[in-house]
Image (cartoon, helix red, strand yellow):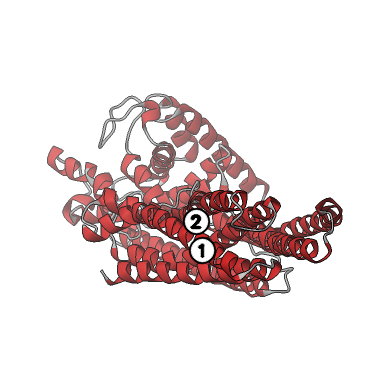
Amino acid sequence: MKEYRQFIQRLILNYIVGSFLAVFVAGGIPMFMSININHTESLLLIAIIAGSLTVMAVCEFLFFMKQRNPIKKAFDNHFKNPKLTQSAYYQLLKFPELTAKRIMGPHLFGFSVPAASISLLLIYNGLLNFSYIYVVYASAASLIIASMHALIEYFLTIKAIQPVILFLNQNVSLPVLPLKSQIRVPINIKLGTAIVLIGIFPVILFLLSAQVKIQQVSGMNPSVFWKWAGVVLIITIGYSILISRIMAKDIEKPILQLQQMMGEVEKQNYIHMENVYTDEFSDLFNGFNKMIHELEKHDAKNKMMLESFLMVLSAALDARDKYTSGHSVRVADFSKGIGIKIDLPKDSIEALYKTALLHDIGKIGVPDNVLLKDGRLSDEEFNLIKAHPVIGENILKQVHPISEIADFLPGVRSHHERMDGKGYPDGLTGKEIPLFGRIIAVADSFDAMTSDRPYRKGMPQEKACHILHEGRGTQWDAKIVDQFIEFINESINKENVS
């Protein structure tokens, strides 16, 4: 496929560019300029380097073929096999790290070790006329160059994998394509390592080249040179580490803050971030705060729409029967009072109120001749009435997104259940009945007993409370009855005081 071909072509181009910059520019030119050798020795060194580079290239090619196989298999399979696709995805995420390892291994065993071994053998046989210590310097320089090459390739590969990951995200359907935490490289490690290597390695290369040149020109003892060079190296290393830590922290801190705030957004806790930054993070934080502001407005609008929807449904139900007008609102108020008495959280009290507002919404599905009948209901008619909790639940399930109304469903379905299991529609007992259902059952019964009907006048609140007390533990939850009676008595006392 086109995406795979472009990916491979980009990796090859990256390798060619990275090799040229690291091996020839950063390593080859300084070292060849540092030593004085004749034409024959130059040819021998070129032959050693060419042969070792060939071995290194073969090793890297074999490693590369192995590393790209999981990705190639998924593309060849056209992503029909989920396991192959997921394996390719994880391989892509690991590819920058694998690339760095692929370069370091062949550089060491395919280039440095063979080149050093052949050079030592030629010096021993008199074919190369310079000190053994130069081979040590060259080997050290080779490892430094390999590290620089690996660093270059690492960051180039990060760019190379991004179009392929984007292609997978947009075109491949899988249950989950998670980013494994063990694959992700923390930015403080990535940035810190890069800065340290960039700061130290050029200095070491310069010192190695300078030592060779100085020793050839003046014959200075290497130990004298390295005493001075050691101080330079220690200062350079310390300075590089310090700068890398400062820069990494400067970038890592706002990123961690953003991650933390995004976690709060997932919990629907909309917290504005204090913007104390003076670089591009300032724009990012301003954008985040603007997003939070828009989310708050959107959330408030949705909340108002939902509340309006609930009130409209409740009013539509009450409009069918003038004698039960206001019943849903009164039950909601009574339920809210119970929720406060039993110390429910604020969010739960709000959900309880809305559930109670909708508890009888299923009666919309009950025929008028049954719902509005003045006399005694037949068994068949009563069965139609008993179906209203299930009808109400089914009506509310049509609301989308369902998450906005999911908390209301158990209470709507269960508000006619009894503690002794003789209720409907499911015959639940005791604590099997959802809490909202147990609360609404008490509030609903109280309002039904105290409200006027065409065939009877509503009873006094004291008598209704007495009936609730007698039914505590059998028909209604005892604790909720006690708290409700206490709530009613407190309300009566407040009215008397007023």
Q: Residue at x 30, y 51 (%)?
A: 454
**Up-down relation of residue 23 to residue 181 (above or below):** below
Residue marked by disc 1: 153
Q: Position of residue 206 (x, y in %)?
A: 73, 65
The quadrant where residue 486 appears: top right
Q: Position of residue 163 (x, y in %)?
A: 40, 69
Determine contact: label 1, label 2, CB under 8 Å.
Answer: yes
Dot 2 lies on which element?
helix
The quadrant where residue 311 appears: bottom left
Q: Residue at x 60, y 72 (%)?
A: 25
Give the class, few, some or many, for how many residues have Cα within 10 Å of label 1's Cα (few <14, many ≥20): many
Q: Residue at x 34, y 61 (%)?
A: 313
Residue marked by disc 2: 103
Q: Position of residue 78 (x, y in %)?
A: 22, 61
| Separation of marks 1 and 2 at Cα, in angstroms | 8 Å
**Up-down relation of residue 10 to residue 457 (above or below):** below
Q: Position of residue 319 (x, y in %)?
A: 32, 62
The quadrant where residue 456 appears: top left
**362, 143: nearer the viewer:** 143
**Up-down relation of residue 484 to residue 213 (above or below):** above
